[in-house]
């Protein structure tokens, strides 16, 4: 069929005719939508989970918790602007980051406030330094 023949896609009466010949994207066609920038929310969630679960390593938990809060706030801002589609992940990262910080600080307070004698096996405070003594008998 030649171009312009009735029933051909370029014919004016053809359904969907827009008055232009098809070309590569960017030449009269709508641009491809941008992929959502979800990296900050995902990063906040991962760091927050690591901080909350690994609170026994309290210095690392506190640092990772702070980073999770920062990345979560940036991710929530991107979601509000429409650049990201995961505001829930960013919020979960903030919550887990706060939890990791609280648990890490609580562990630090326990380690500082509780005396070392409380962790002995027999439960009684003794005056020795924890070393065993032996008796040597010479004949």
Image: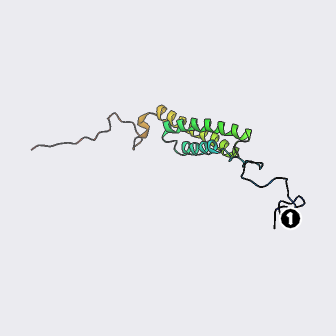
Of 135 and 58, the residue lying toward us: 58
Give the image location of residue 94, x and y in percent. Answer: 64, 39
Residue 79 point in image, percent of width and height: 71, 41
Q: How was this image coloured?
A: rainbow
Element under disc 1: loop
Instruction: Tally the numbered discs.
Output: 1
Which residue appears at 59% of the width and 43% of the height? 43
Vertical placement of residue 77 versus 10, above or below: above
Left of 25 or right of it: where is 137?
Answer: left
Report which quarter residue 118 is drawn in.
top left
Q: Mark 1 highlights which residue?
A: 5
The residue carrying pointer 1 sits among few (fewer than 14), some (14 to 19) or many (20 or more) residues within 10 Å by Cα, namely few
Q: Name, please, the residue furthest toward the right.
A: 13
Residue at image coords 77%, 55%: 22
Q: Position of residue 44 (x, y in %)?
A: 61, 42
Front residue of 35/45: it is 35
The one of 131 and 68 positioned closer to us in this rendering: 68
- In the rendered image, the quadrant that contains the C terminus is top left
- Residue 55 in the figure: left or right of residue 20: left
Please identify the quadrant where the N terminus is shown: bottom right
Q: Residue furthest top?
A: 113
- Which residue is pictured at 34% across the width and 33% down the height? 127
**Residue ID at (90%, 60%):** 13
Q: Please, is residue 137 above or below residue 10 in the view?
A: above
């Amino acid at each position: 069929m030649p171009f312009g023949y009735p029933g051909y896609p370029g014919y004016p009466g053809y359904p969907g005719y827009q008055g232009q010949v098809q070309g590569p994207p960017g030449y009269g066609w709508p641009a491809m939508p941008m992929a959502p920038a979800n990296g900050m929310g995902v990063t906040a969630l991962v760091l927050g989970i690591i901080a909350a679960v690994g609170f026994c390593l309290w210095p690392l938990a506190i640092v990772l918790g702070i980073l999770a809060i920062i990345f979560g706030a940036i991710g929530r801002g991107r979601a509000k602007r429409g650049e990201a589609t995961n505001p829930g992940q960013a919020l979960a990262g903030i919550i887990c980051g706060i939890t990791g910080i609280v648990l890490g600080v609580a562990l630090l307070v326990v380690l500082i406030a509780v005396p070392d004698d409380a962790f002995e096996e027999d439960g009684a405070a003794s005056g020795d330094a924890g070393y065993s003594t032996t008796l040597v008998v010479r004949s």
